Image: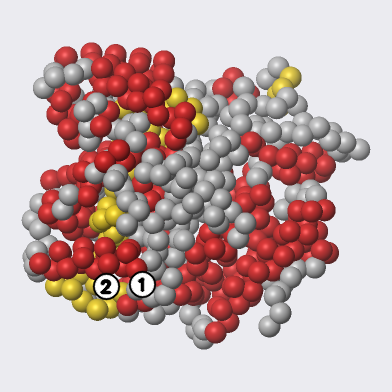
Amino acid sequence: MTLAALTLHAASDTLRRRECSSVELTEAVLARIAASDENIRAYLTVDRQGARDQARQADKLLSENKSDSPLLGVPLALKDNFLTRGLKTTCASKILGDFVPPYDATTVAKLRNAGAVIVGKTNLDEFAMGSSAENSAFHPTRNPWDGARVPGGSSGGSAAAVAADECIAALGTDTGGSIRQPAACCGIVGLKPSYGRVSRYGIIAFASSMDQVGPMTKDVRDSALLLEAIAGHDPADATSVQRPVPKYSEALTGGVKGLRLGVPREYFVAGMAPEVEQAVRRAIAELEKQGARIEDISLPHTSYAVAVYYIIATAEASSNLARYDGMRYGHRAEAADLNDTYMLSREEGFGAEVKRRIMLGTYALSAGYYEAYYLKAQRVRALIKRDFDQAFASCDAIVTPTMPTTAFKIGEKTQDPLQMYLSDIYTISVNLAGLPAISLPCGFDKAGLPIGLQIIGKPFDEATILRVAYAYEQATECHTMKPEDRG
Amino acid sequence: MAQMKLSRDEVQRVALLARLRLTASEEEQLAEQLGAILEYMEQLNQLDITGVEPFSHANDAVTALREDKEVNQPNADALLANAPERDGSFFKVPKIIE
């Protein structure tokens, strides 16, 4: 087995025991990238030199035995919407094609301070808008389990890099499912923390009331370790909360005995692939066998979530993306006057899906439509949040599928934006309500493609969903499967 | 109900607000796609939302106060390095006033 296949906690243990150096581990990851990324194309930028320098630095710290950070010397990947000082950050858009950030995102600074090795920047749907990584302005990413299929999105590059052992772990961002849905497609663990748990400073903004950073990892323990490293208040993000960060990795054991797990009837409806439903039902039965109490619950406004989300997310995006005007950074078109420069720079710089969403959001916010769309969507958002509040009165966590199907084929949904939006049907409500949720592998369909199980928690109760996920993972084996094991 | 379609005038009005110069074929395609998406949004009209307060943010807004001290490290060169056009320590932009 290559060192690149290690989990974060195993890699950290291996480094601490001096069984390998960070330089060796980093070289193993770089070799893996060299061997398989020409095909998978998970990365937009690989920082070979930077990674080697950071690894040498980490080896020095390891030999001095001064730091107890589990990330020290471990090669990680970042979605290309995290600002990285001195390292090109494109958001998979032509409008930021040559952008080199002058500062690090808070989460990136935290990883660097913890001694992590940043290997490179991974592909995504342009501005994190999409569910397949096909909207990248540069190239699509292939699913390591089946090269004809998408890795999911928008954090598709991070998910594929983790699944293909092209990094030890990665970070992504999740606005409507962009960590969990690709995690499900690629058979890895993806966690979206509660809104406000992790700083958004230095993350290229898409929909500011929902964007959140989270870990994408090979197992649940890694997810807890990485969340511990990035969570916490940040004075530079006024929406990050002042709550203390629990030691999530020390709260994994304890099991699910006596825990009340809600299963929302609205999530098991037409449109779900039968094999996905079977796998999720089997996972629920496993948790019940371990002593959890399964509660039938209702989230009655579920069917409105996609409509609400695509009004609010596009409205916020149209406002956030107004900053790309070609003046101080980004692509500038040659044009006769100022207004033409704005309009042509944006026309040339943005791809089709980004334009579609800017148009939709601008429409929803424009005079005469604001109340009918944006304000109405915010009122229905309140009802969706209320559904969860009421459900959590009778359960401690909620168990659902992550996605109605397994990974779809490249090109299958690109012509029909609405069909693409519907692949996020189980993940979107969580962002609207600001809740934490995790996706972990719970089986495979007949074609050998991974299926994701989603566990949704109360606000700031990441500890419980990690505990449920860990209990399930310990009793089952699908998280140990690698794409090359696929029959 | 026949599939909703936005008029070309309406697409052009929104494109101007959004500062996008769309091509004719983009306008045509967006008129159809946005129409279909907006039609899907119509389902929100089935709900009675009288008296429901709009929800804009998951966390209660608190005014974040901090000490009034300088924290920025001025890094003009790194900022200007991304400028499409610069002149010494200035961003160069198209003429704004005729």
Q: Residues within 10 Å of mark 2 (few under 14, many from 20)?
A: many
- The residue lying at 48 percent from left, 40 percent from top is A141
Specify few, some or many for label 1: CA neighbours under 10 Å numbering under 14, 14-19, or 20 or more.
many
On the same chain: label 2 and label 1? yes
The reply to whether dot 2 and dot 1 touch (C-beta < 8 Å) is yes
Q: Quadrant of residue A122?
A: top left
- Which labelled disc corresponds to residue A267? 1
For the residues labelled 2 and 1, the Cα–Cα distance comes to 8 Å
The image's colour scheme reads secondary structure
Residue drawn at point x = 29 percent, y = 44 percent: A486
Residue situated in front as seen by the camera: A306 or B49:
A306
**Callout 2 amino acid:** Val
Q: Where does label 2 land, which residue? A: A263
Position of residue A70 measured from the top left corner of the image (x, y, whole percent): 20, 32
Type of amino acid at the residue the image marks with label 1: Tyr
Image coordinates of residue A397 in percent, x first then y, are 23, 66
Residue A375 vs residue A139, the one in the foreground: A139
